[in-house]
Amino acid sequence: MSARDELRATLRVRCRQLCTKAAAYPFPDAYATPNPYDTAVWWCARTTEALGPDGSAAGPGACDAPGRPCYEPPARPGSA
């Protein structure tokens, strides 16, 4: 799976409150390979800290879980 496809799959479930500076980078091209050394720093937009409102860590995986009480699904085009 290319980096672009992997990112698209991840963004389909990632909480909209999860933030990282890496989100400001351009979308990878179709032939890019995933970075095996993820050095991103993550935080929750609600708390502006590394912990979410439920006291658990904010980051990939932890914030991709629809069962988490503070989870907000990603915005869909055309949705309010």
Image (cartoon, rainbow, N blue to C red):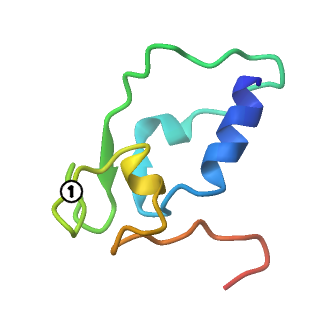
Q: Please, what secondary structure does the residue beneath circle 1 have?
A: loop
Residue projecting furthest to the left:
55
Residue drawn at 42 percent across, 63 percent down? 17
Residue projecting furthest to the front:
67
The x, y position of residue 60, in whole percent, is: 43, 43
Left or right side of 15 for 43: left
Look at the image and tell me in which quarter the N terminus lies: top right
The x, y position of residue 19, in whole percent, is: 41, 50
Look at the image and tell me in which quarter the C terminus lies: bottom right
Task: Say what amino acid the circle numbered 1 marks.
Answer: Ser
Above or below 42: residue 28 = above
Residue located beneath label 1 in the image: 56
Residue drawn at 50 percent across, 63 percent down? 16
Above or below 62: residue 40 = above
In this view, the residue in front, 69 or 14, is 69
Above or below 71: residue 29 = above
Residue drawn at 53 percent across, 55 percent down? 14
Tell me if mark 1 has few (under 14), some (14-19) or many (20+) residues whose alpha carbon lies within 10 angstroms of its own: few
In this view, the residue in front, 65 or 37, is 65
Q: Quadrant of residue 25?
A: top right
Left or right side of 52 for 21: right
Residue drawn at 16 percent across, 62 percent down? 55
Q: Quadrant of residue 21?
A: top left
Disc tally is: 1
Q: Quadrant of residue 12?
A: bottom right
